[in-house]
Image (cartoon, grey):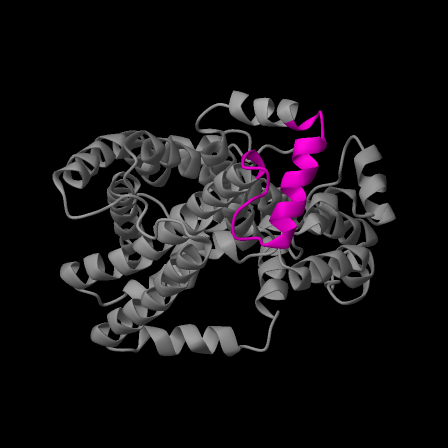
Amino acid sequence: MALLATKCALSSALNNKILSSSKLSCPSSLKLSQRRQRQPQGRHASFPNVVNSSTSPNPSRSPSPSSPSRLLEAQAWRRLQKLLSGIGDGEEELAKQLLEQEPPQSKVFMAVIASSCIATVAQLLCWLGGADPWGGASLSLHSLKAAGVGALASIPLVLLNYYLWTSPRAREQLPFLDEVQSKQVEDFGPMIDGLSPLQLQAFMVAETLPGVLMTYCAGAGLIAHLIHTAADFVANGGSGSFGDLGELAAAAAASSSSSSSSFSIMSSLPPLAPEAVGLAVAASLAGVARGSEIAASEAEYEVIRDAIENAERYYRVAAMGKDSTVVDATEASTTFVTVAIRWMANKQVAAKFAAAMTVVEVVYLGGVWLKEEDLMAPMVAMLIVSGVVFDQIRRRRTGSGSGSSTETSM
């Protein structure tokens, strides 16, 4: 829904506990298996799989599909997915299923209603703060020219997103990329299923425009306006609509020898310094929000931590086959620990990558906005980029894309 496009102003800080995932204490079996130079073979057929933590995700270095270590790794991955799928009460999955069954017209209507509410909030914030609610956009030739500039400015972002979504080489070099893209497919897929091309365009506009208004007008623009207002208030000696407080500040400024130096500091700042500060704050919030969408949740962290701590006991007691030995259980538990830690690290890197990409995008289009002084430029650019992304999401959902997020995210 449209809330996903505007979490930049509403989400909490990125889950710091993910950063400590690589420091989770591993069972003694992990240390034991790392000391062994050679491992017995021929007893892995009935067991899950283990891959050394130094194993590269590069397919050229991975064991063949029929090798014992690969079989152990695949079984460990399936157990991890089973543990993660058991998180929650099922209401979210039920809501997605119901959403998929909604008629296309209802999906578009819900997206328009949600985006209208968010756009109204953005406009209200700008009105309360005295900022331009449209960021300089209007029905004029200037906005038409800005739209053309925005279309040109979108070319680098379009090429980058198309490469990241379609290139097998990109997924090979960035193994965490599937984690980022699968999250977008998971969030928007149920909404766009069954939509006609025209309905998809309407949905895309409903998802994109409120985010632009919230990020630039109610975010960067409002912060910049408040900084300008505060600077003018200080420069005028605190006089204005602040009543007695303003008169007191003016008297203090007149009697203070340091007031002139503070005014000179204000006047020596670059002309676009408030706008740059506002844009930096808005970009940071957008990055934190995007990263928090990808990062492992508290529940996922707890499940993975408990599974790692109990891995050795689980494989020795619950997963022992008839012909398996203690060595097999040790290797299986080591593999599971390795896969789980790799999954946590992958989520961490994916969250940082998504946050960085969002910050770069917001700053880049924000610079175009400040140069043109018209919100139409970043608005058109974002619509074009969103068109590429939504097209790739639809292709992934229908199976016609160049790749899909499967076990490559390990």
| Residue 234 appears in the figure | yes
Residue that sits furthest to the left in the current view: 141
Q: Position of residue 3 (x, y in %)?
A: 43, 62
Does any portion of residue 52 appear in the rendered image? no
Q: At x 74% / y 59%, what residue is drawn?
A: 307
Q: Magenta span covers which residues? A: 234-259
Q: Is residue 94 above or below residue 350?
A: below
Question: Toward the viewer: 4 or 379?
Answer: 379
Q: Quick check: 124 above or below 337?
A: below
Where, by quadrant of the figure, is residue 20 drawn? top right
Q: Is residue 223 left or right of residue 146?
A: right
Q: Position of residue 5 (x, y in %)?
A: 40, 55
Vertical side of 119 occupied by 387: above or below: above
On the image, the x and y values in percent for residue 324 come to: 75, 57
Residue visible at 66% across and 34% down in the picture: 253
Rendered location of residue 39, percent (x, y): 75, 38
Q: Quadrant of residue 233?
A: top right
Nearest the camera: 5 or 261?
Answer: 261
Residue under the point 21% across and 61% down: 202
Image-based side of 194 in relation to 350, left or right: left
Name the foreground residue: 224 vs 360. 224
- The quarter of the image holding the N terminus is bottom left
Asked whether 252 falls inside the magenta stretch, the response is yes
Q: How many marks?
A: 0
Residue in the picture at 55% in, 36% down: 57
